[in-house]
């Protein structure tokens, strides 16, 4: 009957068998109860630290007093153990500092296994709690919130664990709360040319390689016979040629890109500069257009300054210099995508009605649908007008194509609305916040103000026509020039 000190804790299997054999409700013999208590004490000694050992000894003393047993009854089972009075552990002794505070109890539980052998043992002996009281010290009471020892320790732990899990779930829910953005491609699900399935992958790739299509913003310093003013004159002339030939928008942006990349790698004399521009237009037409202008048309438009052989020879030189790399993302491809994001804004309906009403001077002239269509059309035309002005300006080469496109749309929205406006949807698709666009936008407003003056007014005259919605006559957003915004 006596439990050896070397046993590994309490033999719960044998204890359960003995409880079952006793009929579940019969009181165990005094000697068996004493042996069970001692085995439980030995088990507690193996599992808990020094402070908890004091709690167990105090519980044992409490059990002894409550059952009115003489101290000598424990001697056969204690062996070489020191007497409780020798280590000064009495029921009325001052409690030691609690090893685990209530505040950190939940975190302590989290780092330990949920089910221990001690919990299993308490659960199995719960029906005998009236006969074999559990050891309980003042420290243990502090940990458990000074509750009754009769099975409430497990309930307290489970309740605190549930509260802890509930708080964790609430935090996780808060972390997963995201802002819902409108699907800007929902209207093109059945349009195979829109490539809705992988359009995001396309533009992710564009952003990665857009730097390969950029040139150094000071490449003109390596040219000895031409300068940035000559470049501006050439591009202003190419914009007029592009307009007369009624070419696609993509062609114009690719023409300027080919021109800059070639001039950044090769030195060109002044008399050959127009030849480089005409050949760049020819290459862009071959890449983008369905009906390509013939070489003779380009000779005529350049007032027969060059021959057919000179144009074809320059074409070979340019494609070899650029290593036949004509597939580069220009501001045009980003502008189209970002305009689609700007048009998906729900607030555009209200603004469109107000803007169209102000233009028409009467609500009766503009229906709801017509107002939205008119606003979106004006936003697109004004954005293209602003970004084409950037093609002429040499100083705008320091900005990436995606940044130019986003800044052009932001400036256009501010111009039409009369205040700063940039939605979360636009910010998500462009990857540019309002603060990142302000520096570029101030330059765009300054260029817009000067677009109708000076000698290079090709873009301003183009967008002053009915075909382009008189976008050039829109008042610039001068409030963006304020550095205090």
Image (cartoon, helix red, strand yellow):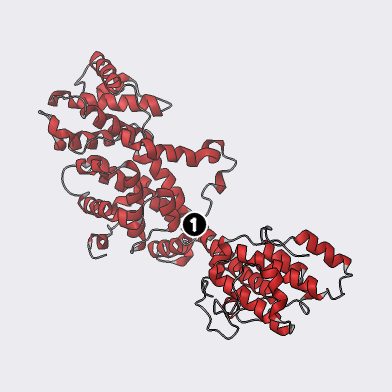
Which residue is at 46% across, 66% downward? 363
Q: Nearer the viewer, residue 163 or 151?
A: 151
Would you identify the image quadrant in which residue 141 lies?
A: bottom right
Which residue is at 70% across, 74% downward? 74
What is the x, y in percent for residue 41?
66, 69
Left or right of 453? Residue 151 is right
Q: Nearer the viewer, residue 109 or 221?
A: 109
Q: Residue furthest left?
A: 224
Q: Nearer the viewer, residue 169 or 397?
A: 169
Inspect this view and state whether residue 261 appears. Answer: yes
Q: Which residue is mark 1?
A: 370
Left or right of 155? Residue 262 is left
Inspect this view and state whether residue 458 appears. Answer: no
Left or right of 310? Residue 6 is right
Q: Work out whether 130 lies above or below 38.
A: below
Q: Residue furthest top?
A: 309
Which part of the image, by quadrant, shows the C terminus? bottom left
Q: Residues within 10 Å of mark 1 (few under 14, many from 20)?
A: some
Left or right of 46? Residue 305 is left
Which residue is at 74% across, 85% downward? 68
What is the x, y in percent for residue 48?
59, 66
Q: Nearer the viewer, residue 10 or 479?
A: 10
């Amino acid at each position: 009957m006596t439990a050896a000190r070397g046993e590994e804790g309490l033999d719960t299997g044998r204890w359960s068998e003995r409880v079952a054999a006793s009929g579940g409700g019969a009181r165990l013999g005094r000697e068996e109860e004493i042996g069970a208590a001692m085995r439980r004490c030995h088990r507690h000694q193996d599992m808990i630290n020094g402070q908890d050992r004091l709690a167990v000894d105090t519980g044992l003393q409490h059990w002894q007093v409550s059952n009115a047993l003489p101290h000598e009854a424990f001697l056969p089972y204690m062996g070489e153990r020191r007497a409780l009075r020798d280590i000064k552990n009495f029921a009325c002794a001052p409690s030691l500092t609690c090893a685990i505070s209530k505040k950190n109890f939940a975190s302590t539980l989290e780092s330990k296994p949920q089910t221990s052998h001690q919990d299993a043992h308490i659960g199995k002996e719960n029906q005998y709690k009236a006969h074999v009281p559990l050891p309980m010290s003042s420290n243990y009471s502090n940990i458990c919130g000074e509750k009754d020892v009769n099975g409430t320790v497990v309930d307290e732990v489970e309740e605190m664990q549930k509260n802890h899990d509930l708080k964790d779930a609430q935090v996780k829910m808060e972390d997963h709360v995201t802002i819902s953005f409108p699907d800007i491609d929902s209207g093109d699900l059945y349009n195979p040319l829109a490539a809705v399935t992988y359009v995001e992958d396309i533009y992710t790739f564009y952003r990665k390689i857009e730097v390969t299509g950029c040139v150094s913003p000071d490449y003109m310093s390596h040219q000895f016979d031409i300068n940035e003013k000559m470049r501006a004159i050439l591009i202003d002339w190419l914009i007029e040629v592009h307009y007369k030939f009624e070419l696609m928008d993509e062609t114009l942006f690719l023409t300027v890109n080919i021109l800059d990349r070639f001039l950044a790698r090769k030195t060109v004399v002044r008399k050959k500069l127009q030849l480089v521009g005409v050949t760049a237009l020819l290459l862009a037409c071959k890449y983008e257009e369905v009906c390509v202008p013939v070489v003779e048309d380009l000779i005529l438009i350049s007032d027969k300054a060059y021959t057919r052989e000179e144009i074809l020879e320059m074409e070979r030189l340019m494609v070899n210099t650029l290593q036949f790399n004509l597939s580069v993302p220009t501001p045009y491809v980003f502008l189209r995508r970002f305009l689609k994001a700007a048009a998906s804004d729900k607030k555009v309906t209200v603004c469109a009605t107000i803007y169209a009403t102000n233009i028409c001077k009467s609500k009766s002239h503009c229906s709801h649908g017509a107002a939205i269509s008119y606003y979106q059309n004006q936003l697109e035309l004004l954005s293209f007008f602003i970004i084409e002005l950037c093609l002429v300006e040499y100083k705008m080469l320091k900005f990436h194509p995606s940044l130019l496109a986003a800044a052009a749309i932001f400036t256009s929205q501010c111009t039409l609305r009369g205040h700063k406006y940039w939605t979360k949807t636009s910010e998500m698709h462009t990857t540019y916040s309002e603060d990142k666009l302000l520096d570029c936008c101030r330059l765009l407003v300054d260029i817009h103000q000067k677009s109708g003056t000076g000698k290079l007014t090709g873009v301003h005259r183009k967008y002053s026509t009915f075909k382009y919605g008189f976008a050039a006559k829109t008042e610039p957003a001068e409030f963006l020039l304020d550095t205090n915004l």
